[in-house]
Amino acid sequence: MALQRLIAQGVADANGNISGLTDPSWVPTVQQVFTGTLSIPDSTITAQWALFVNGQQQVTFIGQSVVTGVQVHTTEILKLSATGLTPGQTVQAVFQASQTPENRTETTSINVTPTGTTQNAGNIQFLAGSNLPVPSSPGVILDLTELIYPANTILANYNTAVITVFNTSGGPVTLVLWGDDATAGDYNYQVVTLDNASTYTTAIPIVGIIELSGDCGVGAGVLADIVLTEEIVAAPGQLVWNGSAFVPFTGGGTIADPLPVATVGQSSFSYGQTAITGSATAIAAPRANRTGLSVHNLAAASGPVYLGDASVSTSTGLCLEPGGSVTFATPSQIYGITAGASITVSWEDE
C-alpha cells in the first residue's frame, strides 16, 4: 500500500505538557500493520517526547527528532507524551506509514535521528551522544573535539548544547553541569537536586567550549542525552517551571521534577460490552482524563455500527463494520446506533 501521512494534533496544557496524543487514523485495519516514520515538525527544541505502544514506552526523543521503524499492529495503540512545550502550544505529530498484511510484515527496530530545529528552518541539529553516564565525581561527559560531525559541519557551526539528564539511580542526586574551554576554565556552572525517576533539560552555550562536564555523586544510573544545535538558545541558566513558563533557575533549594509528566488515565483500565440498538446508545462513560476509548464491532456481528455523539444516525455516524475497531481520545460520551437490529460491541477505556 502507498505511504500514508497520518496526523494527530494536540495542545499543550498550562504546564507545557501533552499526554496520550493519538488519533484513530493511527490504527491499521484488521490483520494489517502500519510501519513508518514519526516526527513532530513544530515541536520546540527543549521538548522531551516519549513514544508508547499499548502503554509500553518504546523510545524518548527531543524536539523535532525523526523516529524511524515505528510499527503498530491492529490491536495496538500508538501514543505520545511530551514535556517542555510552550503552554497552549498546538503541535501536529506526523506518522508517515505504509500498511501491509500482518503475515507479510517484518519486525522493525525503532531508531531516533535528530534533525532540524523549531525556530529556524534549515538550522543544524544532531544527537551528539545518548545514554552518556554522568560521572560520580567531576569529569567529562562529552569531549566536543572528538565527535564526528555531520557532513560539511564542524564544532564552530554549533552554538548550544541541549542536555537532558535522566536519574534512575534509585534516589535523589545533586547534579552539577558545566562547560570547559581550552584553558580549563569552567562556564555556566549549574547545580540542581534531581529526584529519582526525574528528567531535567537545560541549554548550555558552547561557543569556545571543548568539553561538557558533570558530577552527580553516585556511581551509576544518571545518564545524559546531548543534542548540539546551531540555534542560540536563550537563558543559559537552568530551566525550571515557575507555574506558567520555563525560566532560568537562580535560587537554591530542590527541584523535585523540573520536567513533570502529567499522569492521566486509570490505574487499571475499564472494559465491557454494550448492546447497540436502533436508538443512540451510550458506550462506556465520559471521562475527563481519558487517553483512549477503543470500540470493536465483533466479527460475527450481523451488520455495521455507526458511532458519534448523542445525535448520531446511520447516515452521519462513523461506520464500524463487523470485525472493525476504532479508538477515540475525546473525553466526551461516545454513542452508537444500528440500522435497527441489536448489535453488541466490546470496548476498552483507559
Image: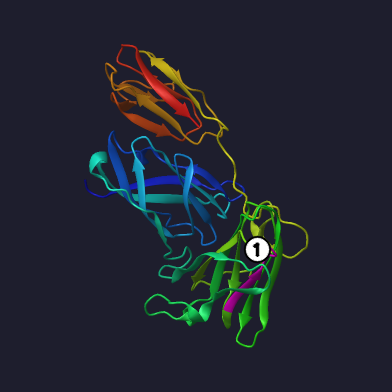
Q: Which x, y percent locates residue 7?
A: 37, 46
Which amino acid does the dot numbered 1 rest on? Gly
Q: Which x, y percent locates residue 186?
A: 67, 79
Q: How many marks?
A: 1
Q: Quadrant of residue 187?
A: bottom right
Q: Is residue 280 visible?
A: no
Q: Which x, y percent locates residue 178?
A: 65, 73
Q: Residue at 42%, 30% (x, y): give it.
A: 294
Q: Residue at 48%, 22% (x, y): give it.
A: 284
> Which residue in the rendered view is the most extreme toward the front?
219
Above or below residue 333? Residue 201 is below
> Which residue in the rendered view is the most extreme toward the right?
252
Above or below residue 208? Residue 100 is above
Left or right? Give the position of 286 relative to 4: right
The boundaries of the magenta stretch are 211-219
Left or right? Give the position of 258 relative to 317: right
Above or below residue 11? Residue 308 is above
- The quarter of the image holding the N terminus is top left
Residue 98 versus residue 241: which sits nearer the camera? 98
Q: Is residue 109 visible?
A: yes
Tell me how the rendering is colored. Answer: rainbow
Callout 1: helix, strand or loop? Answer: loop
Residue 320 versus residue 337: which sits nearer the camera? 320
Q: Quadrant of residue 222?
A: bottom right
Q: Which x, y percent locates residue 3?
A: 26, 50
Residue 230 versus residue 149: which sits nearer the camera? 149
Residue receiving disc 1: 219
Left or right? Give the position of 56 relative to 203: left
Residue 101 versus residue 10: which sits nearer the camera? 101
